Amino acid sequence: MKLDPKDLQILQALQRDARQSLAALGKRIGLSQPAMSERVRKLEDAGVIEGYGARVNLRALGVGLQAIIRIETTHAFIARYVALFESMDEVLEADRVTGEDCFIVRCAIAEPADLQRVVDTLAAHGSVTTSLVLSSPVRKVVTVQAARRHGGHGGLSP
């Protein structure tokens, strides 16, 4: 799907606040409510918008620690690890990567004993390297400027 600048503005605005009404968003970027609804539906149908969600404050839930865990394993255990990640409540994200590591996993944990249990579980089929997250000072959304800078790669085009 080729995206025009209005589509990119819609994506940027929805990433910042998906709860805003389409009418209000359309007014801000110069589209009628029916035109906004149609564009958003097309973005959803094309898989550009995969879903909507809430950003949850983990500390407010009593989960004050996060860890980044790098896992090095063999190809034979890739599918087992994916299933394991999906079954573990502590796993927030798992990325399969190139290089010496096979996966980089972000976990949320309440206390150090939970981290020990998670590490022990993940070390079943490979070696793990763990880092505690001190802070996350930068969280970005896909921006119109970034999409333009990348010349439309990945389906984003001005």
Image (cartoon, grey):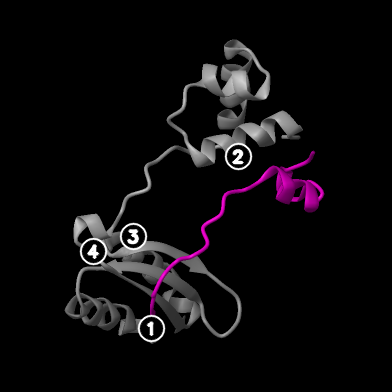
Quarter of the image holding residue 11? Answer: top right
Q: Amino acid at mark 3?
A: Glu
Q: Residues within 10 Å of mark 2 (few under 14, many from 20)?
A: some
Q: Nearest the camera: 32 or 130?
A: 32
Classify residue 4 as left or right of residue 91: right
Q: Is residue 143 magenta?
A: yes
Q: Nearer the viewer, mark 3 or mark 2?
A: 2
Q: What range of the chain is rendered magenta?
A: 131-158
Q: Secondary structure at mark 3?
A: helix
Q: Evaluate if marks 4 and 1 touch, with contact meaning CB atoms under 8 Å apart.
A: no
Which residue, given by chain and number where applicable, does mark 4 sit on?
Answer: 63
The kind of residue tagged 1 is Thr
- Residue 90 tag number: none
Residue where numbered disc 1 is placed:
130
Q: Quadrant of residue 77?
A: bottom left
Marking on residue 86? 3
Task: Give the Cα separation between the discs numbered 3 and 2.
Answer: 29 Å
Residue shown at the point (19%, 74%) measured from the top left: 111
Looking at marks 4 and 1 on the same chain, the residue that comes earlier in the sequence is marked by 4
Precedes in sequence: disc 1 or disc 3: 3
Closer to the N terminus: mark 4 or mark 2? 2
What residue would you read off at disc 2? 12
Instruction: From the image, state whether disc 3 or disc 4 is nearer to you.
Output: 4
Quadrant location, the N terminus: top right
Residue 77 appearing in the image? yes
Mark sitting earlier along the chain (2/1):
2
Q: CA distance from mark 4 to mark 1?
A: 17 Å
Residue found at x 53% / y 35%: 14
The image shows residue 52 at horizontal and vertical percentages of: 44, 37
Counting residues from the N terminus, which is met first, the one under dot 3 or under dot 2?
A: 2
Three-letter amino acid code at the position of disc 2: Gln
Distance (Cα) linking label 1 and label 3:
19 Å
